[in-house]
Amino acid sequence: MSHSSDPVSPEGNESPAATSDTESKDGAVIILFFIIGLAASMVVGWVVFPTLLYSKKYQPVSFNHTLHVKEVENGCQSCHFLRKDGTFSGIPTLNSCKSCHESVQGETEEEARFVSQYVDRNREVPWLIYSRQPDCVFFSHAAHIVTAKMDCVTCHGHIGESDRSPVYEVNRITGYSRNIWGKSIAGIKHNSWDRMKMDDCSACHVRENVRQTSVQTEKGGCFVCHK
Amino acid sequence: MKVDRRSFLAFGVGGAAGTALSPLPWKLTDDLSIWSQRWPWVPIPKDGEIRYETSTCTLCPGGCGIAVRMIGERPVKIEGRKDHPVNQGGVCLRGAAGLQYLYGPSRVRTPLKRVGKRGQGQWARISWEAALSELAGKLKALRNDGHPEGLACITGKDRGTVAALLKRFMTAFGTPNYFGPATSTHALETAVRTMTGQEGPVGFDLEHSDLVLSFGSGLLDGWGSPVRVFKAVSHRIERHAEVIQVDSRMSNTAARADRWIAINPGTEGVLALGMAHVIIAKSLYNQQFINQFAAGFDAFKKIVMADFTPDAVAGITGAAPGVIAELAEKFSQAKRPVALCGRGRGMVPGALSESMAVVALNALVGGINQDGGLRLLPDPAYISWPEPVMDPVALKGNQAPRLDGAGDHPVFSPATPNRFFDQLRENAARTPAILMVAEANPLYTLRDTQAVEKTLKQIPYLVSFSSFMDETARQADLILPNHMFLERFEDVPSPAGFSRPFIGLSRPVVAASYNTRHIGDTLIDLARRLKGSIAAAFRWTNYETCLKETLGRKWDGMLKNGYWMNTAASPVSWNTLFKTRSGRFEFNGEDMAAPPWKSIHVAAAGDSSAFPLVFVPYDSIRLASGSVGNAPFMTKTVPDTVLIKEEIVVEINRETAGRYHLAEGKKATLATPRGQVTVRVHLSDRIMPGLVAMPTGLGHTAYDDFLAGKGVNVNQLIGPAKDPLSGYDAAWGIRAKITKA
C-alpha cells in the first residue's frame, strides 16, 4: 500500500509530510510515556517497595560477638550449644549471661544498660532472631552440625565476627526477618548464608544427597522438613 | 505534546512491564503466602529447653502417673509416665487434654460472692480474708445457736487427706452430715465388707486373668483406672486370655470383646445368679473354698436353685438357657477367671445385691485373692491422726441423724448423697443452713436434676470450693476456688480397681495461675478462725506440712518416685482373710435379716403402657460424666452419632424406630416420667429393640461455650431408685416413649 505517492489521499487532505511528522511525534510521546511508566514502576519495584516492605528494628542490647568469642574456649558452641536431648539451645538465656555479668564487667554503655535493665531486674532479653524460620518448618541443628558436620558460617555467615548487632529488618507482611529472603530483593545470592528460603534448603539437600525421607515418618519429599 | 488516551495506555503498559521486571509481584506473592500461614489464632508453641515434671492425675479415680512436658515454667503437654505401675506410659484422652482445664475460661479465678439472684451469675470479686471471715461468721453463728448439725458437706472424693480433713472439720464442728460420693466402687466395697468383713479397697488382677467376664463394665469406656484397663484388655491376646462382655448394647467394650452377650438392661445380677445355679447344679464350684472357707452356702444354694433356674433367668435377662449354661461352664473351667461389676464407668452404685452376686460368682470358683481374681487389699490406713476432741456443742450436734439417711438401711453404706436431696424434699424442715460442696457437682451428677436444683435452692447458704464455674458453683453464695490438679499437692490412694496397695502423689507442676487456694489450707484457716476445739483439731501450719506429716516415712520416697506401692505384700490367704464373725466368706452377707437376692432385679420406673420403651444412659471414654465436664479437645472427638452441633443423638434399634416412624437423623421427642427433651435419632443394629440409649456427660448448662448447651444431661430424664438394702441409687434406666417431632 503506497498511497503516499497519490496526491489525493482518500484518507484525508493533510499533506503526506505533515502526517508523517505528526505520527512520529505521537509515537515519541507514546514511547516516552511507556518509558516513564516502565521507569516509575521499576523504581517502585526495586527501591520503594523494599523500603516500604521492611521496617527496621534494633536489638534490645547491641551484642559484641568478637569480644565474647575471645573470652570463651569453645567458639560458638560455648553459648549456642546442643542440649543433652539433642535440641538446640539457640540464644542463651539470662542465666548464662549472669554467670559473668552479675555486675558490670567492662566500660561500655551497652553493657551497663544490659546489667541495669535485664540482669538486675531478672528479665529475659527479648532478642530478635535473624534466622527464625516459620513454625511449620522442623529444623534440627543436631542433624546439620553433628551428623552433617556443617559449620555455623555456612548458614549464619560471619555473625560471630561482628562487633555490634546488625539492624533487624522485619518483613511487615510475614513478620519474619529479612535474612530469610536475603538482603538482595532480587533474591541474588553470592554466599551460602545470603538466603535461607525453602529452595535453599532443598537445593543443599539434593546437592549433598541427603536422605530424602523423613526420619520420623519415612515419608518423602515435603515431610523431611514439614512434619 | 499531546497527552491522550494512548499515552496513558502506554504509561500503563510500561508500568506493567516494569513491574514484571521488578521483584515486587514475585516477592509479594511469596510474602502473602507466608502471611496466610500466620493467622493470629494459630498457636505457636513456646520454644526452649524441655523438662518433665511428674505428678498424678486426679481427673478421675484412675490415679495415672503423668509426666508434664514443660518449656520454661509453662506446661505444654501431658504424657503418661512410662515407669508408672498403674498406667505404664499410657494416658487417656482426658488426661492428654488436661492442660485445657488449667488455662480454660471456666476457671474461677478469685473468691467470689454472689451479688445478683441465685444462679444469675453476678459476682463480686472479694479477697480471701473477706471470704473466709464471712464464712467463719456464718459458721460461728450456727454453733452459737446450738445447731452445728445445720452444716452439711457434699464431696466428690472420700479417700486421702483432703477428704479426711473435710470429714474431720465436720466432726470437730459438730455435724454428722458429711456425704462422700456413692459409685459402683462404693457398692462393691460395701458388698465385700458385708461378705468378708474386710474394710478397704477391692482390686481386680486383670493382668493375670485368663477370662474376664464383665457384667456391663465399660472396660474400654472408662471403667476403673481406664489406661490400666485398656492395657490389660489389649494385652490379652499375648496372654491367650478372653474378654466376655455382657451388655444391652454394643458398647465399645462389647465391640472389641471376644464375645458379646446381649441381655436386657438391668439384669446383669440376675444373669450372675443364673450362672451360679448352673455352677452349683453341675458341682463346678471350688470344693475346697466352699467346704472350708464359706458360710451360708446352703441358704444361697437353696435360693439360687429355686429362683434362678436357667429358664427363669432366661425369661428375665433374654439370654438363652444354653448360653447361660455355656457361660457358667466356661467361667468355672477357666484357670484364673474374674467377674467384674459396675455398669459403664461405674458412676452409679446400683443395687447392693448385684455387686454381691458378682462377688459370690468369684467366690464360687475360688477366685478371691488368687492370681487373676478379685483382690481384697489391706486399707493403706496411713491417715492416723488422733480423733478430734469435740466440745459439748459438737458432741450434741454429732448425735443428730444424718440428712442422707445412710445407716437407716440394713447394710450401712458410707454415703448416699442422692438420699440427702430426697429426704429434704420429703421434709423441708430438715434443710441445713449451710451446704459446702467440694470437688462435686451434685446439680449435674445426681439423678433428677430438676428436683435437685429445686431442693438446692431451699438451702439458705451454699459454699462451693470448685476450681471451675460448674452448675453447682453457679448457684453458690460464696465460691472459695481450689487450685486445679496441676497446681496442688494431694495424696491419691488406691486407684480404682488396682490390684496392689498403692498411694499416688499429685504435686504442683506449675505455680497457681490465679488467686486460688488449696482446699486443705482453706480448711485449716477456717478452723483457726473458729477457735477452741476446732482449731485444736487442725494444728498443722498448712496443708503441705499436714500431708508430709501424715505420710511420714513414705514421704521422701513418694517425692522421689511419685508414688508408694507395697510390692512385697502378697495376697492374704483364705485362712486369715475373712474378718466376719464366722471367720468365713458369707455368701448372703453378714447382718442381713434375710438373704439379699430378692432385690436383685430392679425394674425401670414408670408405667409400661404410657412409656413402652426403656431409656438407658451409656458411658463413653470421649465424654467425662463426673463433676468436671469435658475439655474442649475431648468434645472434638465425639462422633455425629452422639452429637450433631448442639443436638444430642440417641441410639435406637432400626426395628423399634420403624414402629415409631423415625428415620435416621430426624428429630424426635423423648419423654420419661421425669422429663422430656428433643433429640435426633440414630438407627442402629447394635442395640436391643425396645431401648433408647443416650450418652452421659453432655447437657452441661454451666462452664464455658465449649461445653455449655451441647446435648442433654441424662440425669434430667432419670430419677433415683432406692436400693432397699443399702439406700444406694440403683437406677440403671427408666421407662420412656419416643414420638416423631
Image (spheres, coloured by chain):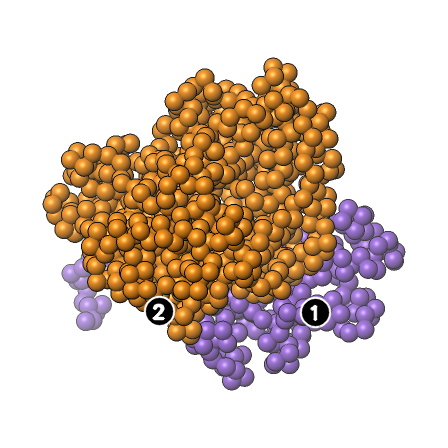
User: Are the residues under marks 2 and 1 on the same chain?
Assistant: no
Numbered disc 1: secondary structure: loop
Residue drawn at point x = 43 percent, y = 34 percent: B409
Q: Which residue is mark 1?
A: A81
Report how many numbered discs are placed on residues in the image: 2
Q: Secondary structure at mark 2?
A: helix
x then y, percent, for residue B577? 54, 56
The mark found on residue B278 in the picture is: none
Subunit under mark 2: B
Q: Residue at x 61, y 40 (%)?
A: B164
Identify the amino acid type marked 2.
Gln
Q: Position of residue B301 (x, y in %)?
A: 33, 53
Crowd around label 1: few <14 · some 14–19 · many ≥20 (10 Å): some
Residue B614 % position (x, y): 23, 42
Mark 2 crowdedness (10 Å alpha carbons): few <14, some 14-19, many ≥20: some
Q: Which chain is purple?
A: A
Closer-to-camera residue (B34/B557): B557
Q: Nearer the viewer, residue B685 or B568?
A: B568
Residue bearing mark 2: B333
Label 2 with label 1: CB-CB less than 8 Å: no
User: In the rendered view of the protein, which quadrant contains the C terminus of chain B?
Assistant: top left
Residue A88 is at least partly visible in this image: yes
Residue drawn where x is 40% and y is 51% of the image: B296
